[in-house]
Amino acid sequence: MTTFVLCHGAWSGGWGYRRVAEIIRAAGHDVFIPTYTGVGERSHLASPDVNLETHIQDVLGLIKWERLEEFVLVGHSYGGMVITGVADREFEKISRIVYLDAFLPKDGQCLNDLTTAAQQEHMFNLAKEQGDGWQVPRPDGSIADTVSAEDREWIESLSSAQPLATFTQKLKLAGNHLKIADKVYVLATEKKATPFYQFAGWTRQQEGWQTVELPIHHHLLQSLPEKTAEVIMGR
């Protein structure tokens, strides 16, 4: 049996991994899906002080109190920021790290540094106009036709605003996360103009990385759970 820690993206929660987790558990493995402070079922804890470090601490706390050792760490989208920070501090406990169409930052970078100027401006405007200056609601049309109409309604109904500071706080890294022997980057290739191509391009040139392409949209947790689970399990 293998233990998996699945870290979700922005505007989401542990619920986003529901289908993937069911498949992994059915294969006989143990799965933990932390929901970050201020989103999902923990949205009542949202405040201007919630930042990237808060979410890293959420996962580090899970690792400590569940006494996790030799586990697989997985992050989707914004979750790549979180797992990078976690892995940099707990790399000796992580047997495998998997980035699912996720941000892969370097030392001193925040999520906004890895997006376009137009995207950054849009996030700040959303926070200013709809989030009291510190919360970013899920952008209209961000799901669009990437999932079925039923799944789109499900995702939108459960989406919560994301604290802006999680996008703007820069990550301090020692580089320990790169010491993990088994590293995987999964690129969703259905849409060509995404920020994630830059990370897949980098991992292809590095030793110790496996780069996987899936012909699917960014919301692969909902639209391709079986294949996503297989990749996570290393099949």
Image (spheres, helix red, strand yellow):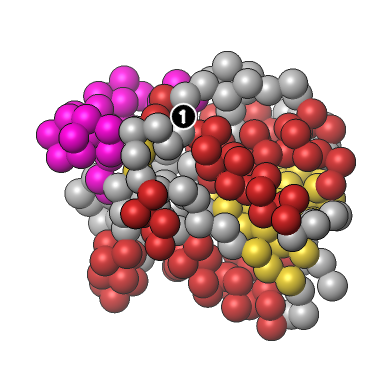
Residue holding disc 1 = 111
Where is residue 139? Give x, y as percent.
Answer: 24, 45
| Quarter of image, res 46 | top left
Where is residue 24? Give x, y as percent.
Answer: 68, 73
Outermost residue, bottom side: 26
Q: Residue at x 84, y 72 (%)?
A: 1
Is 137 on the left-hand or right-hand side of 174?
left
Where is 87 relative to 229, above or below?
A: above
Numbered marks: total: 1
In magenta, the rendered stretch is 110-138
Where is residue 182? Give x, y as percent.
Answer: 82, 46
Outermost residue, left side: 129
Is 50 on the left-hand or right-hand side of 32?
left
Q: Amino acid at mark 1?
A: Leu
Element type at mark 1? helix
Residue 210 vs residue 32, the one in the foreground: 32
Where is 112 relative to 63, above or below?
A: above
Is 142 on the left-hand or right-hand side of 208?
left
For the stretch drawn in magenta, the main secondary structure is helix
Mark 1 closeness class: few <14, some 14–19, many ≥20 residues within 10 Å: many
